[in-house]
Image (tube, coloured by chain):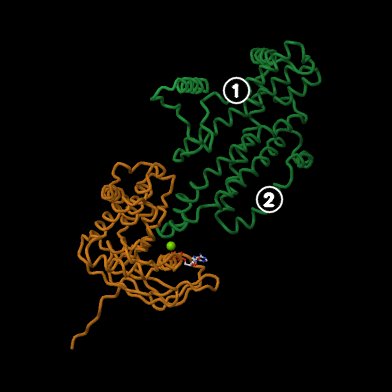
Chain colours: A green, B orange
Amino acid sequence: MTDILSARYIHAAAQAERREPFVVPAPTRATRLTPARLPAGLRLLGPIVVIAIWEAASRLGLISPSTLTAPSTALVTGYQMLADGSLLPHLLASAFRAYTGLFLGVVVGVALALASGLTRSGEALIDGLIQIKRAIPTLALIPLVIIWLGIGEAMKIFLIFTAVLVPVYINTHAALRGIDIGHIELARTLGLTRSEFIRKVALPGALPGFFVSLRLAVALCWTALVVLELINTQTGIGYLMNRARDWGQTDIIVVGILIYAALGLVSDAVVRLIEARVLSYRRSLGS
Amino acid sequence: MTFHRPLPSSVVLRDLSRGFKGKTVLDRISLEIPHGRFVALLGESGSGKTTLLRALAGLDEDAETHGHFSVPDNVSVLFQDSRLLPWMSVIDNITLGLRRPDAQAAALDMLAAVGLADKAEAWPATLSGGQKQRASLARSLLREPALLLADEPFGALDALTRMRMHALLFQLVERQKPTVILVTHDVDEALLLSDRILVLKDGRIAEDHAIGLPHPRRAHQPEFATLRQTLLRSLGVEVDNV
Ligand SMILES: Nc1ncnc2c1ncn2[C@@H]1O[C@H](COP(=O)(O)OP(=O)(O)O)[C@@H](O)[C@H]1O
Ligand SMILES: [Mg+2]
């Protein structure tokens, strides 16, 4: 696209030099204050460049396989693990933990945000607690939760749940509290009941904030999982990576990293797709 | 002996005062508006027009208010910004909170009357400014209000759109005959539409003009021009050559 534009510009400039009487100058583009929307797929340019450099460096022997495996080797390893069935159980174990924690965190986070955003007693009871939880890093809770729940699945799911809960609550609550005062006045002059107000004004108005929180939560559940799977497990992507470290298998470690990245991106894309459907009434910038 | 009992007026204010944080904005205003009258409320910016209208609409409860006022039960407010909910279609917006069994059919009729028949299912974000205000007008009139309170509803529209909105508002109000209080800073708008013009100054009603001109009114009519000069002058505009 840039090529076409610059070619046209050069063409016009050449014409201008010949001083033809009716030369139309190349269209000057209006100043854009926000960048134009990227064509689909162009977003992948950066990652592809990085992977190409990485691959080239590996092939040229600049990076030794014991430090970091080449992406192509990792892909082959990943394919083999998928083919011989040694990957899938771990993938499923990880996905189960992440999505169970995510689901619980979103449901409870939204429920608490509603209770706290729509009632005074709810706010008095809940908001302070969540703000305190927010100040405590999830990882700092690990020792205590291990004592309570052991080192099994319950501990992992519980910690993902608490990690997800906070951003879901904070953003949804803020969206509910930040409702447009003009909409409240409108609801009053239209004589809406409280339940009509909640269903038709407050909740739809808070949906964009909820989706922001959902995207944070989806990213967070995988992040939390990585750390938790380093703690005494026999299944999961994190376990595979940890074991590969003991054996110096950097290709498996890279496979694990790629899987985490892919799951994070796919999850985010799914949420964005749903968001675009649900919030289709907005004419938004960018994404 | 005849026992004469006048019909109660639509809007009655008795020494209504309202202020914010100790600063008086409305100062003991008394006013009666009979049913079905179209009253325009003029005044310089900051003279308290919005404050008066919002008081009648039951908004700003935290303001310091003294005196009394009474308005009909069925009041509808037309805001300057159309306040359509962006997540609802136009028809869902205008039927919001409407409690009558034939809401959908009545809404479609009303949308047709304001020229938005083909926009019933559209999102508000896809409407122009004038279309949004027409939808907002449809939402108000669909409630068949006894009192319509309009705060500079056409203030943000371009001149041509505003003229069309004047005609539309006049026609619909003629049909339903609600009492109307229209806040405006546009003297011509007030003169074109209203039966009575009030000028608010220093928190009081400084002038009260009955406008007897027949409709449709034209700005070049001599009476119109005379009133226009008077009103502009009382709003502090020098009008030697206007
Ligand atoms: N909610 C409020 N809090 C404090 N002051 C207010 C409030 N609303 C209006 N005022 C003040 O009251 C005065 C009249 O305002 P307003 O009624 O909006 O005037 P108008 O609509 O005639 O331009 C202004 O000085 C304004 O600053
Ligand atoms: Mg005002």
Give the vertical position of B78 relative to B36 (above or below): above
Q: Which of A44 and A255 lies nearest the eye of the viewer?
A: A44
Cβ of mark 2 under 8 Å from ligand 1: the answer is: no
Closer to viewer: mark 2 or mark 1: 1
Residue linked to disc 1: A45
Q: Which of A220 and B234 lies nearest the eye of the viewer?
A: B234
Residue B50 left/right relative to A42: left
Residue linked to disc 2: A131
Q: Earlier in the sequence, mark 2 or mark 1?
A: 1
Q: Which residue shows up at 24% across the image and 56% down it?
A: B171
User: Is residue A246 among what the camera can see?
Assistant: yes
Residue A149 left/right relative to A34: right
Give the amino acid type for the residue marked by disc 2 in the picture: Gln
Give the vertical position of A191 relative to A55 (above or below): below
Which of the numbered marks, if any, corresponds to residue B176?
A: none
Label 1 crowd bin: few (<14), some (14–19), many (20+), radius 10 Å: few
